[in-house]
Image (cartoon, rainbow, N blue to C red):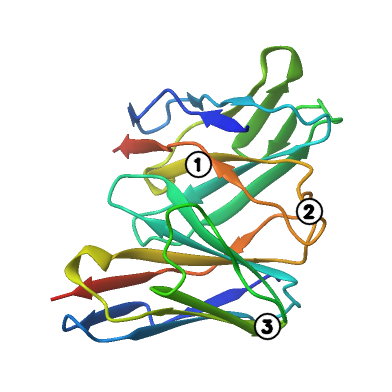
Amino acid sequence: GAVVSQHPSRVICKSGTSVKIECRSLDFQATTMFWYRQFPKKSLMLMATSNEGSKATYEQGVEKDKFLINHASLTLSTLTVTSAHPEDSSFYICSASTGGSNQPQHFGDGTRLSIL
Amino acid sequence: AQKVTQAQTEISVVEKEDVTLDCVYETRDTTYYLFWYKQPPSGELVFLIRRNSFDEQNEISGRYSWNFQKSTSSFNFTITASQVVDSAVYFCALSGQERASGSRLTFGEGTQLTVNP
């Protein structure tokens, strides 16, 4: 149980392109979804917290207009990297939770984004 | 503010050795939760265990065991008889009494474990 699907797993695109990453909870309803960014050999950096039906809460230093998050249903959240540049290249991971600090977050497989 | 420290950046062992990964945390919350996740080279994070702050019982699951000591704010993870497949980055994480709709995880920097044949 508690499967989270993230798609695509890998994206290579040109600078200036917008890229959408989907995160789906397959067998449970995710009240909350989280988006992380991970640099090589580094820990996960929380970018934003998204609750179904409301605006995402972004961490300090994360550009809201650059990283658009939509959490339209209890099973789907999307992250759109707008007008991507090479410095946006990274590993992006989503997680989903049924809510509450006692519930583990279940992670997607991640998306490796490479901007040329 | 919450903080998780994994002082061991990298550990290398030979197969069948026991290995302990250290985790020390800081929090002002009276109720909090501790987690361990495994990240193999393929990148996905695998949930291993959750422990709440009121339960200091050690837990064993197969070759894995966890030692939670509130007095030293530590939640260490031991792999017994390590195997090559245990090679991964292991993250310790902490969540506290955040807003009810879901709590942020504070991650440690991770420990890269390499098990050599």
Image spot of residue A100 (x, y percent): 80, 56
**First reached walking from the N terminus: tag 2 or tag 1:** 1
Q: Is residue A82 left or right of residue A45?
A: left
Is the residue marked by circle 2 packed among few (<14), some (14-19), or many (20+) residues within 10 Å? few
Residue that mark 2 sits on: B99
Residue that mark 3 sits on: A75
Residue that mark 1 sits on: B91
Using the image as rendered, state which of residue A109 and residue A60 is in the foreground. A60
For the image, the number of numbered tags is 3
Using the image as rendered, state which of residue B44 and residue A81 is in the foreground. A81
Quick check: A20 above or below A63? below
The amino acid type of the residue labelled 1 equals: Phe
The amino acid type of the residue labelled 2 equals: Arg
Q: Is residue A112 left or right of residue B61?
A: left
Question: The residue tagged with tag 1: helix, strand or loop?
Answer: strand
Image spot of residue A113 (x, y percent): 29, 72
The amino acid type of the residue labelled 3 equals: Thr
Q: Are marks 2 and 1 on the same chain?
A: yes
Label 1 resides on the chain identified as B
Q: Are marks 2 and 1 in contact (CB under 8 Å)?
A: no
Image spot of residue B106 (x, y percent): 58, 42
Question: The residue tagged with tag 3: helix, strand or loop?
Answer: loop
Label 3 resides on the chain identified as A
Q: Are marks 3 and 1 in contact (CB under 8 Å)?
A: no
Q: Residue at x 27, y 51 (%)?
A: A40
Q: Is residue B24 left or right of residue A98?
A: left
Label 2 resides on the chain identified as B
Using the image as rendered, state which of residue A13 and residue A5 is in the foreground. A13
